[in-house]
Image (cartoon, rainbow, N blue to C red):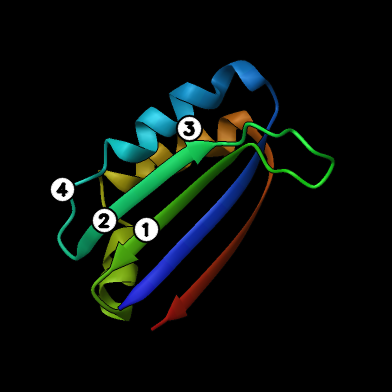
Amino acid sequence: MVKHIVLSKLIDQQDRQRAVDALLDMRGKIEGLLDVEAGYDFLASGRSYDVAVICTLKDRAALDFFRDHPIHLPVVKLMNDIRESSVTVDYEY
C-alpha cells in the first residue's frame, strides 16, 4: 500500500472548502485509489499549511496510474491555480 500526502498553502483562504470538495470528489472514481481524506487547518499557526490530502493507493503502479488519470488532472490544475506552495510525501507501508 502507498500513502500519498500533500499539504498546500493557499493564496486565498476562501478557497479552502472548494479545494477540499474537489479532492474528496475523487473518492471511488479512480481504480487503485482506495481512500481519500482531505480537510483544512483550523489552528492557523505559523507552521500550518491550509489544506491536507491523504490518499491511500493499492501500490506504486496505482500511484502512477492516479497521477495522469483524467479525474485527477483537473484537481491538480485547480490546486496549482489556487495554492502558493505545497509539500508532499509518498511512502509504502
What residue do we see at 54% from left, 26% from top?
16
Callout 3 amino acid: Leu
Residue farthest to the front? 43
Is residue 38 shown above or below 6? Answer: above
Q: Residues within 10 Å of mark 2 (few under 14, many from 20)?
A: some
Q: Quadrant of the N terminus?
A: bottom left
Q: CA distance from mark 3 to mark 2?
A: 20 Å
Q: CA distance from mark 3 to mark 4?
A: 19 Å
SS for tag 1? strand
Question: Of marks 4 and 1, which one's residue comes earlier in the chain?
Answer: 4
User: Foreground residue, 17 or 65?
Assistant: 17
Callout 4 amino acid: Gly
Question: Of marks 3 and 2, which one's residue comes earlier in the chain?
Answer: 2
Instruction: Give the number of the mark in front: 3 or 4.
Output: 4
Callout 2 amino acid: Asp
Q: Which residue is mark 1?
A: 55
